[in-house]
Image: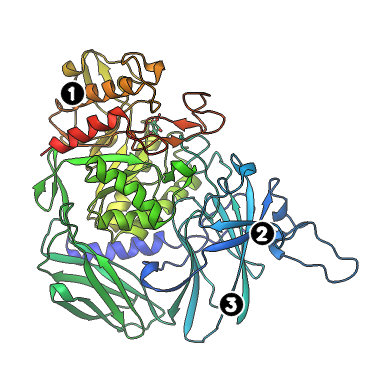
């Protein structure tokens, strides 16, 4: 397809998919529980813009009955007694204070398992200026959020792991302003994820909050990557907002001697198509270039890497060279503190563990993880798999559910489309084969490819066919994916059909396989039999890893492995009082590292495997 027509199709898709309906306003001005994605602005690359951090101490009110959203309490009005007969049965001042970013469950012992509403409040001073526009940007709030500025509703968002933002320009006051947010982390049957998932439901303003300013006419967003299949052609676009057509835009990559000048079209877009002589990004040499984009009124910079990822037959190629993805999965959690990871230092902890294991690839399970992890992983030379939390029991075929999945997919791709470290977008995890599921995921895969043709599409599944010692991959969804990703627990949830060395894997699809999950539980320091699963010994886990690797080495179309999981993590599905510390920790013990970061015996098996893979 000619670049021009693909570019036009892309424009059409990206504009339609990013124009969400307004949040549903209840009669009293608040938003009822069926929150939808409100109209959002689309500023990309917040760290590269003029922003004021709103991180820090926020006042909070814990509202277990969600009473504050009704017209009686109307907490968002933040009223104070004036006359002698006035009184209110809530106040932000003098109450709980939470650190933002950070989940609220880990900040108060009484909230460890809390699933409900917490109201947050932060005040800030603002200097109005007619040629400035103002936005509030959230990197992530789990799960549902209603945002109020000076007690006026400005929008809602649903989804705990993708960024959202609202323009404040016409509403923010000169001087002191107050932001109030109602956050609700209750699991809902039509949520994404839905009611059941195997990770801890940390709620709250779990990621950074920023007040962003732009000129009246500004650089809204851009996509600058190598064209699919090329190592010498940069392709993409720049989008201005608030400008007349024919505005001058300049894209410079000084180190590559690139200096493109162009004018915007009627929709404010400049198409980018630049021949380039570049040092390509790779795990060994994670080269990033300083990219400067300027318009007549705005400018923005970002470190961007250029690489090519492709599949040919059953092999995966990075920059034209066959590569094996030496991976590991992990959740966005710091186990020692039993809390969500949110900061640069948290990212450093998790990514250093992955590098130490010998990885060149990480699976960010089971949701888009925070911006610090993604940007730092890219700088550390780690390729990434990023996925939306379409996880196990999802009601496919429901239009409202589909619009939520599409919104999360758009928000994930929109945030990270310039992160060359991300090589795979994954559409779902362990959803059951079926017409509605296939239709939904095929459409999401097509949509993702239309807005980002440069990356591979996956969707991890676990339904495989056992027949004697032969395992066949037959999930027809595979026809519409670039790589096949199988989660299997032979030796743990499933018995070995034969000796590991005798297991034969067959695939009906001529595509590379990533073993996207395998593993077993072990309690660190618990030693004993290597053949009794219920022992939770390190020796059992170690032997299982040895058996798994014996099998993996015999799969000719295997091009990646992602053991489940880097480090023990918390999940309310894990209730054994001693082996999983049920009432306190609720630990899923499949970590290669313990919840304190100590190496179990299986860690050394995996480390040795990766060290010896060429
Ligand atoms: C599943 C699932 C994981 C889960 C794991 C387990 O495959 O994808 O989210 O944690 O198995 O049971 O430990």
Nearest-to-viewer mark from 1 and 2: 1
- Name which residue lies at 36% across and 60% down: 415
Q: Whole-Å distance between the Cαs marked 1 and 2? A: 58 Å
Judge whether 495 appears above or below 455 on screen: above
Quarter of the rendered image showing ligand 1? top left
- Name which residue lies at 33% across and 82% down: 245
- Name which residue lies at 31% across and 19% down: 491
Between 391 and 602, which is closer to the camera in this rendering? 602
Q: Is residue 544 left or right of residue 148?
A: left
Disc on res. 299 = none
Query: Dot 2: few (<14), some (14–19), or many (≥20) neighbours within 10 Å?
Result: many
Location of mark 3 (residue): 125
Disc on res. 30 = 2
State the SS at label 3.
strand
Q: Is residue 137 left or right of residue 80?
A: left
User: Mark 1–mark 2 contact, CB under 8 Å?
Assistant: no
Q: Is residue 325 left or right of residue 30?
A: left
Q: Considering only order in the chain, which callout, 2 or 1, is on the residue closer to the N terminus?
A: 2
State the SS at label 1.
helix
Judge whether 398 appears above or below 290 on screen: above
Q: Quarter of the image holding residue 228?
A: bottom left
The quadrant of the picture occupied by the N terminus is bottom left
Query: Dot 1: few (<14), some (14–19), or many (≥20) neighbours within 10 Å?
Result: some
Q: Considering only order in the chain, which callout, 1 or 3, is on the residue closer to the N terminus?
A: 3
Q: Is residue 61 left or right of residue 356?
A: right
Disc on res. 550 = 1
Residue 58 seen from this side: yes
The quadrant of the picture occupied by the C terminus is top left
User: Mark 2–mark 3 contact, CB under 8 Å?
Assistant: no
Q: Where in the figure is residue 146, as x and y percent of width and height?
A: 59, 58
Q: Is mark 1 within 8 Å of ligand 1?
A: no
Q: Quarter of the image holding residue 4?
A: bottom left
């Amino acid at each position: 397809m000619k670049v021009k027509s693909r570019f036009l199709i892309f424009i059409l898709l990206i504009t339609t998919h990013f124009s969400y309906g307004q949040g549903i306003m209840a009669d009293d001005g608040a938003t009822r529980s069926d929150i939808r994605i409100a109209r959002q602005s689309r500023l990309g690359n917040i760290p590269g813009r003029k922003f004021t951090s709103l991180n820090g101490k926020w006042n909070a009110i814990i509202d277990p009955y969600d009473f504050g959203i009704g017209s009686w309490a109307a907490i968002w009005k933040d009223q104070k007694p004036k006359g002698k007969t006035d009184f209110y049965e809530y106040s932000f001042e003098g109450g709980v204070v939470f650190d933002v970013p950070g989940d609220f469950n880990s900040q108060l012992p009484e909230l460890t398992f809390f699933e409900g509403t917490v109201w947050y409040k932060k005040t800030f001073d603002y200097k109005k200026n007619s040629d400035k526009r103002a936005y509030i940007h959230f990197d992530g709030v789990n799960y549902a959020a209603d945002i109020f500025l000076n007690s006026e509703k400005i929008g809602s968002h649903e989804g705990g792991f993708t960024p959202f933002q609202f323009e404040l320009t016409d509403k923010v006051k000169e001087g002191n302003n107050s932001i109030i947010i109602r956050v609700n982390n209750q699991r809902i049957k039509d949520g994404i994820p839905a009611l059941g998932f195997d990770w801890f439901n940390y709620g709250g303003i779990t990621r950074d909050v920023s007040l962003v300013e732009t000129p009246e006419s500004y650089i809204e967003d851009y996509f600058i990557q190598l064209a699919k299949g090329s190592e010498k052609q940069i392709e993409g676009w720049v989008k201005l907002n608030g400008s007349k057509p024919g505005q001058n835009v300049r894209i410079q990559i000084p180190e590559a001697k690139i200096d493109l000048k162009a004018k915007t079209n009627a929709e404010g877009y400049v198409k980018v198509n630049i021949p380039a002589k570049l040092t390509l990004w790779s795990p060994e040499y994670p080269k990033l270039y300083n990219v400067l984009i300027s318009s007549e009124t705005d400018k923005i910079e970002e470190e961007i890497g250029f690489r090519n990822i492709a599949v040919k037959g059953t092999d995966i190629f990075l920059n034209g060279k066959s590569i094996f993805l030496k991976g590991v999965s992990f959740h966005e959690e710091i186990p020692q503190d039993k809390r969500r990871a949110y900061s640069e230092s948290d990212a450093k902890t998790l990514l250093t563990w992955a590098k130490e294991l010998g990885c060149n690839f990480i699976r960010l399970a089971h949701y888009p993880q925070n911006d610090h992890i993604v940007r730092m992983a890219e700088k550390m030379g780690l390729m990434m798999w990023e996925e939306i939390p379409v996880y196990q029991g999802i009601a496919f075929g429901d239009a409202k559910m589909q619009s939520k999945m599409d919104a999360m997919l758009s928000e994930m791709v929109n945030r990270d489309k310039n992160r060359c470290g991300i090589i795979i977008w994954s559409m779902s995890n362990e959803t059951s084969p079926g017409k509605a599921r296939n239709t939904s995921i095929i459409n999401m895969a097509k949509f993702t490819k239309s807005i980002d043709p440069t990356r591979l599409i996956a969707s991890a599944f676990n339904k495989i066919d056992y027949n004697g010692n032969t395992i066949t991959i037959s999930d027809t969804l595979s026809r519409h994916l670039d790589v096949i990703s199988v989660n299997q627990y032979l030796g743990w949830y499933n018995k070995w059909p034969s000796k590991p060395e005798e297991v034969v894997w067959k695939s009906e699809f001529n595509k590379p396989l990533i073993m996207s999950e395998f593993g077993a539980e072990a309690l660190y320091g618990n030693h004993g039999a290597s053949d009794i699963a219920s022992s939770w010994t390190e020796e059992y886990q170690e032997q299982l890893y040895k058996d798994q690797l014996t099998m993996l080495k015999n799969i000719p179309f295997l091009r990646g492995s992602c053991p489940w999981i880097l480090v023990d993590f918390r999940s309310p599905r894990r209730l054994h009082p001693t082996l999983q510390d049920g009432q306190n920790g609720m630990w899923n013990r499949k970590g290669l590292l313990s919840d304190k970061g100590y190496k179990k015996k299986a860690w050394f098996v995996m480390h040795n495997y990766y060290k010896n893979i060429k």
